[in-house]
Image (tube, grey):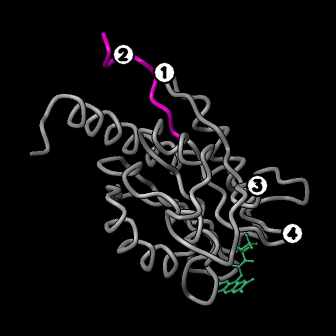
């Protein structure tokens, strides 16, 4: 049955900063998504999406990124908190597509040096998700004090994150399947 074909859930590493700790979180999320049965994934590093910064929006769409967003059933956004908001370059990359996202699921992973786990950045991303046509799930993963969560090689030190990630992915996959069913069977009018 068509409904049995694998979901595609890429993980987007949402910063280009040298020495970014979010890379550890993104790698872990990618590993955990890859363990799910009937789910395909890819780690997309926004530093490798070739977009100019002297223009913005769909005018600068990268065909490979656009194709991945078209294929995606859900996205995991790994979003570091920068000055109580999200990374500007993450938004720059997301802004390059629009139709590609409509009626697809998204889950946000906040990463911060401080104790709030990127929640302020996540809250500021929510209206952006809505405008892009993405449907945000009601779980987040919050890597607070991220410098204490991973060791220098990027290995997870705190195993308590694994059941949280599991719950987050369970909800994301449910939403991805539900929305795919809707996209494919229920006319949007
Ligand atoms: C420009 C900038 C602003 C930041 N603002 C915050 C902040 O508001 N709250 C916070 O907890 N950490 C803040 N941080 C620290 C990051 O959250 C921290 O570096 C964390 O590891 C996630 O970002 P990274 O992936 O770039 O490492 C900031 C870092 C930068 C580079």
Q: What residue is rendered at 62% in x and 52% in y?
A: 62
Q: Earlier in the sequence, mark 3 or mark 1?
A: 1
Compute the Cα span from label 4 to label 3. 15 Å
Q: Earlier in the sequence, mark 2 or mark 3?
A: 2
Compute the Cα span from label 2 to label 3. 32 Å
Q: What residue is rendered at 79% in x and 72% in y?
A: 17
Q: Where is residue 170 drawn, in percent x and y?
A: 41, 39
Q: What residue is rendered at 54% in x and 40% in y?
A: 67
Q: For mark 4, what is the residue?
A: 19
Q: Secondary structure at mark 4?
A: loop
Point out the image quarter for the N terminus: top left
2 inside magenta stretch: yes
Q: Where is residue 88 drawn, in percent x and y?
A: 61, 78
Q: For mark 3, what is the residue?
A: 48
Q: For mark 2, what is the residue?
A: 4
Is label 3 in contact with label 1 (beta carbons under 8 Å)?
A: no
Of tags 4 and 3, the one toward the viewer is 3
Is label 2 in contact with label 3 (beta carbons under 8 Å)?
A: no
Asked whether mark 2 lies closer than 8 Å to ligand 1, one says: no
Q: Earlier in the sequence, mark 1 or mark 2?
A: 2
Is label 4 in contact with label 3 (beta carbons under 8 Å)?
A: no
Q: For mark 1, what is the residue?
A: 38
Residue occupying the far top of the picture: 1
Q: Earlier in the sequence, mark 1 or mark 4?
A: 4
Residue neighbourhood size for the residue with mark 2, other residues' Cα within 10 Å, grouped as few (<14), some (14–19), many (≥20) = few
Q: Secondary structure at mark 1?
A: loop
Residue neighbourhood size for the residue with mark 1, other residues' Cα within 10 Å, grouped as few (<14), some (14–19), many (≥20) = few
Is 100 placed left or right of 85 in the picture? left
Point out the image quarter for the C terminus: top left
Q: Where is residue 136 drawn, in percent x and y?
A: 35, 58
Report the span colored magenta. 1-9
Asked whether mark 4 lies closer than 8 Å to ligand 1, one says: yes
């Amino acid at each position: 049955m068509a409904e049995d074909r694998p979901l595609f859930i890429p993980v987007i590493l949402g910063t280009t900063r040298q020495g970014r700790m979010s890379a550890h979180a993104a790698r872990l999320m990618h590993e955990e998504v890859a363990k799910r049965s009937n789910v395909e994934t890819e780690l997309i590093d926004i530093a490798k999406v070739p977009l100019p910064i002297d223009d913005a929006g769909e005018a600068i769409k990268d065909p490979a990124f656009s194709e991945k967003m078209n294929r995606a059933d859900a996205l995991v956004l790994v979003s570091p908190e920068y000055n109580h908001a999200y990374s500007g370059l993450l938004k720059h990359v997301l802004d390059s597509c629009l139709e590609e996202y409509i009626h697809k699921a998204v889950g946000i992973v906040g990463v911060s040096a401080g104790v709030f786990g990127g929640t302020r950045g996540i809250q500021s991303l929510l209206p952006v998700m809505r405008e892009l046509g993405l449907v945000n799930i009601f779980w987040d993963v919050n890597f607070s004090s991220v410098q204490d969560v991973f060791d220098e090689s990027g290995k997870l030190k705190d195993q308590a994150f694994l059941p949280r990630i599991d719950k987050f992915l369970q909800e994301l996959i449910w939403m991805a399947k539900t929305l795919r069913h809707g996209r494919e069977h229920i006319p949007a009018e």
